[in-house]
Image (cartoon, grey):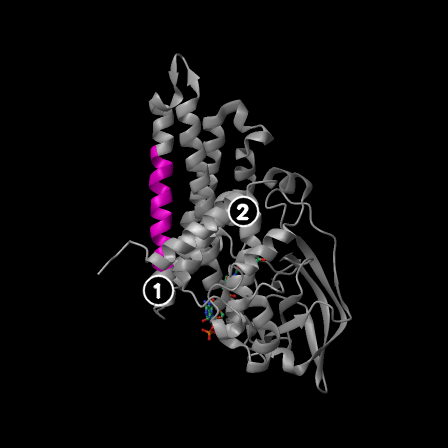
Amino acid sequence: MIDFSLTSEQELIQKTAREFAQDHLAPGVIERDEKAIFPKQQIKLMGELGFMGMMVPEEWGGSGLDTVSYVIAMEEIAAVELATSTIMSVNNSLVCQLLLDRGTEAQKEKYLKPLAAGQKLGAYSLSEPESGSDASNMHTYAKKDGDHYIINGTKNWVTNGINSDIVILFCMTEKGVGYKGISAFVIDKSTPGLTTGKKEDKLGIRASDTCELYFEDCKVPVKNIIGEEGEGFKIAMKALGGGRIGIAAQALGLSRAALDASITYAKERKQFGKSIGEFGAIQNKIADMGTEVDAARLLIWRAAKLKDDGKKYSRESSMAKLFASTTAMKAATDCVQIHGGYGYMQEYGVERLMRDAKITQIYEGTSEIQQLVIGRDLLK
Ligand code: CAA
Protein backbone atom coordinates (compact mmCIF):
# COMPACT_ATOMS: atom_id res chain seq x y z
CA MET A 1 0.00 0.00 0.00
CA ILE A 2 1.26 3.49 -0.79
CA ASP A 3 0.16 6.17 1.65
CA PHE A 4 1.45 9.71 1.16
CA SER A 5 -0.26 11.16 4.24
CA LEU A 6 1.67 12.12 7.35
CA THR A 7 0.93 10.70 10.79
CA SER A 8 -0.35 13.14 13.42
CA GLU A 9 3.10 12.99 15.05
CA GLN A 10 4.78 13.89 11.75
CA GLU A 11 2.32 16.74 11.23
CA LEU A 12 3.20 18.06 14.67
CA ILE A 13 6.94 17.86 13.89
CA GLN A 14 6.34 19.73 10.63
CA LYS A 15 4.36 22.44 12.42
CA THR A 16 6.93 22.79 15.21
CA ALA A 17 9.81 23.04 12.73
CA ARG A 18 7.93 25.51 10.54
CA GLU A 19 7.05 27.75 13.49
CA PHE A 20 10.58 27.55 14.87
CA ALA A 21 12.00 28.55 11.49
CA GLN A 22 9.62 31.50 11.14
CA ASP A 23 10.10 32.73 14.70
CA HIS A 24 13.82 32.10 15.20
CA LEU A 25 15.51 31.75 11.83
CA ALA A 26 13.71 34.25 9.60
CA PRO A 27 14.70 37.24 11.77
CA GLY A 28 18.31 38.12 10.99
CA VAL A 29 18.77 35.58 8.20
CA ILE A 30 20.12 38.18 5.74
CA GLU A 31 22.53 39.64 8.32
CA ARG A 32 23.84 36.21 9.36
CA ASP A 33 24.47 35.43 5.69
CA GLU A 34 26.19 38.76 4.97
CA LYS A 35 28.38 38.77 8.06
CA ALA A 36 28.84 34.98 8.24
CA ILE A 37 27.46 34.79 11.79
CA PHE A 38 27.03 31.26 13.19
CA PRO A 39 23.45 30.75 14.54
CA LYS A 40 24.63 29.66 18.00
CA GLN A 41 21.47 30.51 19.93
CA GLN A 42 19.25 28.97 17.28
CA ILE A 43 21.22 25.72 17.30
CA LYS A 44 20.95 25.60 21.09
CA LEU A 45 17.16 25.99 20.84
CA MET A 46 17.00 23.32 18.16
CA GLY A 47 18.79 20.99 20.57
CA GLU A 48 16.17 21.72 23.22
CA LEU A 49 13.40 21.01 20.70
CA GLY A 50 14.97 17.65 19.85
CA PHE A 51 16.07 18.57 16.31
CA MET A 52 19.76 17.75 16.72
CA GLY A 53 19.48 14.00 17.33
CA MET A 54 16.15 13.21 15.75
CA MET A 55 16.79 9.58 14.74
CA VAL A 56 18.64 8.63 17.94
CA PRO A 57 16.62 6.62 20.50
CA GLU A 58 15.66 8.48 23.67
CA GLU A 59 17.93 6.25 25.80
CA TRP A 60 20.89 7.84 23.93
CA GLY A 61 19.67 11.41 24.29
CA GLY A 62 17.76 11.69 21.01
CA SER A 63 14.14 12.04 19.94
CA GLY A 64 13.61 8.45 18.78
CA LEU A 65 11.97 9.44 15.50
CA ASP A 66 12.17 7.95 12.02
CA THR A 67 13.96 9.25 8.92
CA VAL A 68 10.68 10.41 7.37
CA SER A 69 10.13 12.72 10.37
CA TYR A 70 13.72 13.93 10.04
CA VAL A 71 13.35 14.93 6.37
CA ILE A 72 10.06 16.66 7.11
CA ALA A 73 11.75 18.80 9.76
CA MET A 74 14.79 19.36 7.54
CA GLU A 75 12.61 20.70 4.72
CA GLU A 76 11.10 23.30 7.07
CA ILE A 77 14.42 24.49 8.52
CA ALA A 78 16.07 24.63 5.07
CA ALA A 79 13.16 26.58 3.60
CA VAL A 80 14.17 29.50 5.81
CA GLU A 81 17.94 29.14 6.33
CA LEU A 82 19.96 26.56 4.44
CA ALA A 83 23.06 27.25 6.54
CA THR A 84 21.28 26.20 9.74
CA SER A 85 19.94 23.07 8.09
CA THR A 86 23.52 22.18 7.08
CA ILE A 87 24.64 22.32 10.72
CA MET A 88 21.61 20.21 11.67
CA SER A 89 22.23 17.73 8.87
CA VAL A 90 25.87 16.99 9.72
CA ASN A 91 25.08 16.50 13.41
CA ASN A 92 22.04 14.27 12.80
CA SER A 93 22.62 12.13 9.77
CA LEU A 94 26.40 11.85 9.70
CA VAL A 95 27.75 12.16 13.25
CA CYS A 96 24.92 10.85 15.45
CA GLN A 97 23.77 8.16 13.03
CA LEU A 98 27.32 6.84 12.62
CA LEU A 99 27.91 6.67 16.39
CA LEU A 100 24.53 5.02 16.87
CA ASP A 101 25.29 2.40 14.21
CA ARG A 102 28.94 1.68 15.02
CA GLY A 103 29.89 3.28 18.34
CA THR A 104 30.75 1.21 21.41
CA GLU A 105 28.55 1.57 24.50
CA ALA A 106 31.24 3.78 26.04
CA GLN A 107 31.46 5.98 22.91
CA LYS A 108 27.68 6.29 22.85
CA GLU A 109 27.60 7.25 26.52
CA LYS A 110 30.39 9.83 26.25
CA TYR A 111 29.80 11.26 22.76
CA LEU A 112 26.41 10.30 21.31
CA LYS A 113 24.32 11.33 24.33
CA PRO A 114 25.39 15.01 24.44
CA LEU A 115 25.47 15.23 20.62
CA ALA A 116 21.95 13.86 20.23
CA ALA A 117 20.66 16.09 23.01
CA GLY A 118 22.12 19.14 21.25
CA GLN A 119 24.46 19.93 24.17
CA LYS A 120 27.46 19.33 21.93
CA LEU A 121 27.99 19.73 18.21
CA GLY A 122 29.66 17.28 15.86
CA ALA A 123 31.69 17.47 12.65
CA TYR A 124 32.48 14.81 10.05
CA SER A 125 35.95 14.99 8.54
CA LEU A 126 36.60 12.94 5.40
CA SER A 127 37.96 15.26 2.67
CA GLU A 128 41.54 16.41 2.24
CA PRO A 129 43.13 18.98 -0.06
CA GLU A 130 43.91 16.24 -2.62
CA SER A 131 41.04 13.89 -1.79
CA GLY A 132 37.46 15.07 -2.47
CA SER A 133 35.40 12.83 -4.77
CA ASP A 134 38.20 10.25 -4.66
CA ALA A 135 37.58 9.94 -0.95
CA SER A 136 39.80 6.95 -0.22
CA ASN A 137 42.94 8.63 -1.61
CA MET A 138 43.75 10.32 1.71
CA HIS A 139 47.08 11.00 3.43
CA THR A 140 46.29 11.80 7.06
CA TYR A 141 47.89 8.99 9.01
CA ALA A 142 47.32 7.55 12.48
CA LYS A 143 50.32 5.57 13.75
CA LYS A 144 49.65 3.14 16.58
CA ASP A 145 51.84 3.73 19.62
CA GLY A 146 50.89 1.53 22.60
CA ASP A 147 47.41 2.44 23.76
CA HIS A 148 47.25 5.55 21.56
CA TYR A 149 47.32 6.59 17.90
CA ILE A 150 49.48 9.54 16.89
CA ILE A 151 47.70 11.41 14.08
CA ASN A 152 49.31 13.74 11.53
CA GLY A 153 47.77 15.40 8.47
CA THR A 154 45.41 18.05 7.13
CA LYS A 155 41.67 17.70 6.49
CA ASN A 156 39.55 20.29 4.74
CA TRP A 157 36.03 21.56 4.00
CA VAL A 158 34.94 20.48 7.48
CA THR A 159 31.41 21.72 8.16
CA ASN A 160 31.01 22.77 11.85
CA GLY A 161 34.83 22.59 12.00
CA ILE A 162 35.12 25.64 14.23
CA ASN A 163 31.98 25.43 16.39
CA SER A 164 32.01 21.67 16.95
CA ASP A 165 33.10 19.90 20.14
CA ILE A 166 33.54 16.43 18.64
CA VAL A 167 34.93 15.28 15.28
CA ILE A 168 34.49 12.01 13.42
CA LEU A 169 37.79 11.61 11.60
CA PHE A 170 38.68 9.26 8.76
CA CYS A 171 42.38 8.63 8.20
CA MET A 172 44.86 5.93 7.19
CA THR A 173 46.04 3.41 9.77
CA GLU A 174 47.79 1.32 7.13
CA LYS A 175 49.45 2.67 4.01
CA GLY A 176 49.54 1.04 0.56
CA VAL A 177 46.34 -1.00 0.86
CA GLY A 178 43.90 1.59 -0.55
CA TYR A 179 40.53 2.02 1.10
CA LYS A 180 41.20 -1.03 3.32
CA GLY A 181 43.77 1.07 5.24
CA ILE A 182 41.22 3.70 6.36
CA SER A 183 39.88 3.81 9.93
CA ALA A 184 37.33 6.01 11.71
CA PHE A 185 37.87 7.81 15.03
CA VAL A 186 35.80 9.91 17.38
CA ILE A 187 37.91 12.77 18.71
CA ASP A 188 37.42 15.57 21.22
CA LYS A 189 38.14 18.88 19.54
CA SER A 190 40.10 19.97 22.61
CA THR A 191 42.69 17.18 22.11
CA PRO A 192 46.20 18.71 22.01
CA GLY A 193 47.66 18.61 18.51
CA LEU A 194 44.29 19.28 16.84
CA THR A 195 43.87 22.86 15.62
CA THR A 196 41.46 24.57 13.26
CA GLY A 197 42.26 26.72 10.23
CA LYS A 198 40.62 30.00 9.31
CA LYS A 199 36.88 30.17 8.77
CA GLU A 200 36.46 29.80 5.00
CA ASP A 201 34.79 32.67 3.11
CA LYS A 202 32.06 30.94 1.10
CA LEU A 203 29.67 31.72 -1.79
CA GLY A 204 26.67 30.44 0.18
CA ILE A 205 25.60 28.86 3.49
CA ARG A 206 27.76 31.60 4.97
CA ALA A 207 26.26 31.37 8.47
CA SER A 208 27.61 27.83 8.82
CA ASP A 209 31.31 27.44 9.44
CA THR A 210 33.74 25.50 7.31
CA CYS A 211 37.46 25.14 7.95
CA GLU A 212 40.57 23.01 7.71
CA LEU A 213 41.64 20.77 10.58
CA TYR A 214 45.33 20.26 11.34
CA PHE A 215 46.58 17.18 13.18
CA GLU A 216 50.14 17.51 14.49
CA ASP A 217 51.20 14.58 16.66
CA CYS A 218 47.64 14.47 17.96
CA LYS A 219 47.43 11.67 20.53
CA VAL A 220 44.11 9.81 20.51
CA PRO A 221 43.34 6.79 22.75
CA VAL A 222 42.90 3.42 20.99
CA LYS A 223 39.40 3.21 22.54
CA ASN A 224 38.35 6.11 20.27
CA ILE A 225 38.50 4.02 17.10
CA ILE A 226 35.04 3.36 15.62
CA GLY A 227 34.66 -0.22 14.40
CA GLU A 228 37.81 -2.14 13.48
CA GLU A 229 40.99 -0.87 11.86
CA GLY A 230 40.44 -0.77 8.08
CA GLU A 231 36.65 -0.49 8.30
CA GLY A 232 36.64 3.30 8.06
CA PHE A 233 35.85 3.70 4.38
CA LYS A 234 32.76 1.50 4.51
CA ILE A 235 31.64 3.27 7.69
CA ALA A 236 32.08 6.64 5.91
CA MET A 237 30.18 5.49 2.82
CA LYS A 238 27.29 4.06 4.81
CA ALA A 239 26.92 7.30 6.77
CA LEU A 240 26.99 9.31 3.54
CA GLY A 241 24.24 7.11 2.10
CA GLY A 242 21.96 8.31 4.89
CA GLY A 243 23.43 11.82 4.91
CA ARG A 244 22.52 12.31 1.27
CA ILE A 245 18.81 11.91 2.11
CA GLY A 246 19.20 14.83 4.53
CA ILE A 247 20.98 16.96 1.90
CA ALA A 248 18.21 16.15 -0.56
CA ALA A 249 15.68 17.36 2.02
CA GLN A 250 17.67 20.55 2.45
CA ALA A 251 17.57 21.12 -1.30
CA LEU A 252 13.82 20.46 -1.24
CA GLY A 253 13.27 23.08 1.48
CA LEU A 254 15.19 25.66 -0.53
CA SER A 255 13.28 24.77 -3.73
CA ARG A 256 9.98 25.17 -1.91
CA ALA A 257 11.07 28.57 -0.62
CA ALA A 258 11.91 29.57 -4.20
CA LEU A 259 8.50 28.34 -5.37
CA ASP A 260 6.62 30.19 -2.60
CA ALA A 261 8.52 33.44 -3.23
CA SER A 262 7.94 33.12 -6.99
CA ILE A 263 4.19 32.59 -6.59
CA THR A 264 3.81 35.52 -4.19
CA TYR A 265 5.81 37.86 -6.43
CA ALA A 266 4.15 36.70 -9.66
CA LYS A 267 0.75 37.61 -8.18
CA GLU A 268 1.88 40.99 -6.83
CA ARG A 269 4.09 42.35 -9.60
CA LYS A 270 2.24 44.16 -12.37
CA GLN A 271 3.72 44.84 -15.82
CA PHE A 272 1.93 45.73 -19.05
CA GLY A 273 -1.24 46.28 -17.00
CA LYS A 274 -1.51 42.83 -15.40
CA SER A 275 0.20 40.62 -12.85
CA ILE A 276 3.24 38.86 -14.33
CA GLY A 277 1.77 35.50 -13.23
CA GLU A 278 -0.77 35.93 -16.02
CA PHE A 279 1.99 35.65 -18.62
CA GLY A 280 2.70 32.17 -19.95
CA ALA A 281 6.46 32.76 -19.70
CA ILE A 282 6.20 33.09 -15.92
CA GLN A 283 3.46 30.47 -15.49
CA ASN A 284 5.58 27.85 -17.24
CA LYS A 285 8.52 28.45 -14.92
CA ILE A 286 6.27 28.18 -11.87
CA ALA A 287 4.57 25.05 -13.23
CA ASP A 288 7.92 23.31 -13.76
CA MET A 289 9.13 24.43 -10.34
CA GLY A 290 6.01 23.08 -8.60
CA THR A 291 6.24 19.76 -10.44
CA GLU A 292 9.93 19.32 -9.64
CA VAL A 293 9.42 20.22 -5.97
CA ASP A 294 6.76 17.51 -5.65
CA ALA A 295 8.86 14.95 -7.54
CA ALA A 296 11.88 15.69 -5.31
CA ARG A 297 9.76 15.23 -2.19
CA LEU A 298 8.50 11.85 -3.38
CA LEU A 299 12.03 10.62 -4.13
CA ILE A 300 13.18 11.80 -0.68
CA TRP A 301 10.28 10.20 1.18
CA ARG A 302 10.90 6.94 -0.69
CA ALA A 303 14.58 6.88 0.28
CA ALA A 304 13.75 7.80 3.89
CA LYS A 305 11.09 5.07 4.11
CA LEU A 306 13.46 2.44 2.69
CA LYS A 307 16.02 3.41 5.34
CA ASP A 308 13.37 3.22 8.08
CA ASP A 309 12.29 -0.21 6.84
CA GLY A 310 15.87 -1.49 7.02
CA LYS A 311 16.04 -1.99 3.25
CA LYS A 312 18.86 -1.09 0.83
CA TYR A 313 18.64 2.60 0.00
CA SER A 314 21.97 3.88 -1.31
CA ARG A 315 20.86 4.16 -4.98
CA GLU A 316 17.56 5.79 -3.97
CA SER A 317 19.35 8.20 -1.64
CA SER A 318 21.70 9.26 -4.46
CA MET A 319 18.73 9.65 -6.82
CA ALA A 320 16.96 11.86 -4.28
CA LYS A 321 20.06 14.01 -3.77
CA LEU A 322 20.83 14.29 -7.47
CA PHE A 323 17.30 15.29 -8.41
CA ALA A 324 16.58 17.54 -5.42
CA SER A 325 19.84 19.48 -5.73
CA THR A 326 19.38 19.98 -9.49
CA THR A 327 15.85 21.18 -8.72
CA ALA A 328 17.14 23.58 -6.06
CA MET A 329 19.64 25.21 -8.39
CA LYS A 330 17.07 25.54 -11.18
CA ALA A 331 14.28 26.75 -8.89
CA ALA A 332 16.51 29.35 -7.24
CA THR A 333 17.78 30.61 -10.61
CA ASP A 334 14.25 30.85 -12.01
CA CYS A 335 13.06 32.53 -8.82
CA VAL A 336 15.69 35.26 -9.26
CA GLN A 337 14.70 35.54 -12.94
CA ILE A 338 11.01 35.95 -12.04
CA HIS A 339 11.96 38.68 -9.55
CA GLY A 340 14.01 40.45 -12.24
CA GLY A 341 16.04 43.40 -10.94
CA TYR A 342 14.62 43.02 -7.42
CA GLY A 343 15.77 39.40 -7.38
CA TYR A 344 19.33 40.54 -7.85
CA MET A 345 19.15 42.74 -4.74
CA GLN A 346 20.11 41.36 -1.34
CA GLU A 347 17.07 42.65 0.58
CA TYR A 348 14.62 40.44 -1.34
CA GLY A 349 16.38 37.34 0.00
CA VAL A 350 16.15 35.34 -3.22
CA GLU A 351 19.71 35.94 -4.45
CA ARG A 352 20.80 34.07 -1.30
CA LEU A 353 18.73 31.06 -2.40
CA MET A 354 20.71 30.98 -5.65
CA ARG A 355 24.07 31.18 -3.84
CA ASP A 356 23.01 28.63 -1.20
CA ALA A 357 21.53 26.13 -3.68
CA LYS A 358 24.89 25.48 -5.33
CA ILE A 359 26.39 23.66 -2.37
CA THR A 360 23.69 20.98 -2.45
CA GLN A 361 25.15 19.87 -5.82
CA ILE A 362 28.63 19.65 -4.30
CA TYR A 363 28.82 18.44 -0.70
CA GLU A 364 28.22 14.89 0.54
CA GLY A 365 29.08 13.78 -2.99
CA THR A 366 28.85 15.94 -6.13
CA SER A 367 26.07 15.36 -8.66
CA GLU A 368 28.63 13.53 -10.77
CA ILE A 369 29.38 11.15 -7.87
CA GLN A 370 25.64 10.56 -7.33
CA GLN A 371 25.40 9.66 -11.04
CA LEU A 372 28.32 7.28 -10.57
CA VAL A 373 26.65 5.57 -7.58
CA ILE A 374 23.30 5.32 -9.40
CA GLY A 375 24.85 4.20 -12.69
CA ARG A 376 27.04 1.53 -11.08
CA ASP A 377 24.08 0.17 -9.13
CA LEU A 378 21.78 0.05 -12.16
CA LEU A 379 24.41 -1.65 -14.29
CA LYS A 380 25.70 -4.24 -11.84
N1 CAA B 1 27.99 1.20 2.19
C1 CAA B 1 28.88 0.23 2.52
N2 CAA B 1 29.97 -0.07 1.76
C2 CAA B 1 30.16 0.64 0.64
C3 CAA B 1 29.27 1.68 0.23
C4 CAA B 1 28.14 1.95 1.05
N3 CAA B 1 27.25 2.88 0.74
N4 CAA B 1 29.73 2.22 -0.91
C5 CAA B 1 30.87 1.54 -1.23
N5 CAA B 1 31.11 0.61 -0.28
C6 CAA B 1 32.20 -0.38 -0.27
C7 CAA B 1 32.27 -1.13 -1.59
O1 CAA B 1 31.36 -2.23 -1.60
C8 CAA B 1 33.70 -1.59 -1.61
O2 CAA B 1 33.86 -2.72 -0.78
P1 CAA B 1 34.25 -4.18 -1.40
O3 CAA B 1 35.62 -4.01 -2.00
O4 CAA B 1 34.24 -5.09 -0.20
O5 CAA B 1 33.20 -4.51 -2.42
C9 CAA B 1 34.42 -0.44 -0.93
O6 CAA B 1 33.45 0.29 -0.15
C10 CAA B 1 35.08 0.50 -1.92
O7 CAA B 1 34.06 0.98 -2.76
P2 CAA B 1 34.34 1.48 -4.24
O8 CAA B 1 35.22 0.50 -4.96
O9 CAA B 1 33.01 1.79 -4.86
O10 CAA B 1 35.20 2.80 -3.95
P3 CAA B 1 35.63 3.97 -4.92
O11 CAA B 1 37.00 4.38 -4.56
O12 CAA B 1 35.31 3.64 -6.34
O13 CAA B 1 34.70 5.19 -4.42
C11 CAA B 1 32.80 6.64 -4.48
C12 CAA B 1 33.34 5.20 -4.50
C13 CAA B 1 31.30 6.46 -4.61
C14 CAA B 1 33.33 7.47 -5.62
C15 CAA B 1 33.16 7.27 -3.11
O14 CAA B 1 34.55 7.54 -3.04
C16 CAA B 1 32.40 8.54 -2.85
O15 CAA B 1 31.25 8.49 -2.40
N6 CAA B 1 33.01 9.72 -3.09
C17 CAA B 1 32.43 10.99 -2.72
C18 CAA B 1 32.87 11.37 -1.35
C19 CAA B 1 31.93 12.31 -0.66
O16 CAA B 1 30.71 12.15 -0.75
N7 CAA B 1 32.48 13.24 0.06
C20 CAA B 1 31.70 14.14 0.84
C21 CAA B 1 32.52 14.67 1.96
S1 CAA B 1 31.69 14.77 3.48
C22 CAA B 1 30.76 16.17 3.42
O17 CAA B 1 30.56 16.81 2.42
C23 CAA B 1 30.13 16.45 4.73
C24 CAA B 1 29.95 17.86 5.07
O18 CAA B 1 30.76 18.46 5.72
C25 CAA B 1 28.66 18.49 4.70
Q: Residues within 10 Å of mark 1 (few under 14, many from 20)?
A: some
For discs 2 and 1, the disc positioned in front in the rendered view: 2
Quadrant housing residue 326: top left
Q: Is ligand 1 closer than 8 angstroms to the Cβ of mark 2? A: no
Q: Residue at x 44, y 68 (%)?
A: 64
Q: Residue 47 in the image: state x and y as whole percent.
A: 56, 60
State which region is magenta: 287-303
Does residue 248 show up?
no
Marks 2 and 1, how far apart at CA: 25 Å
Does residue 53 show up?
yes
Residue tagged by mark 2? Answer: 82
Circle 2: residue type: Leu
Q: Main secondary structure of the magenta part?
A: helix
Q: Residue 58 lies in magenta, yes or no?
A: no
Q: Residue 11 in the image: state x and y as whole percent.
A: 37, 53
* Quadrant the C terminus occupies: bottom left
**Upstream in sequence: badge 2 or badge 1:** 2
Circle 1: residue type: Leu
Closest to the observer, 306 or 233: 306
Closest to the observer, 356 or 44: 44
Residue tagged by mark 1? Answer: 306
**Which residue is the extreme one toward the bottom?**
146
**Which residue is the extreme one toward the top?**
273
* Quadrant the N terminus occupies: bottom left
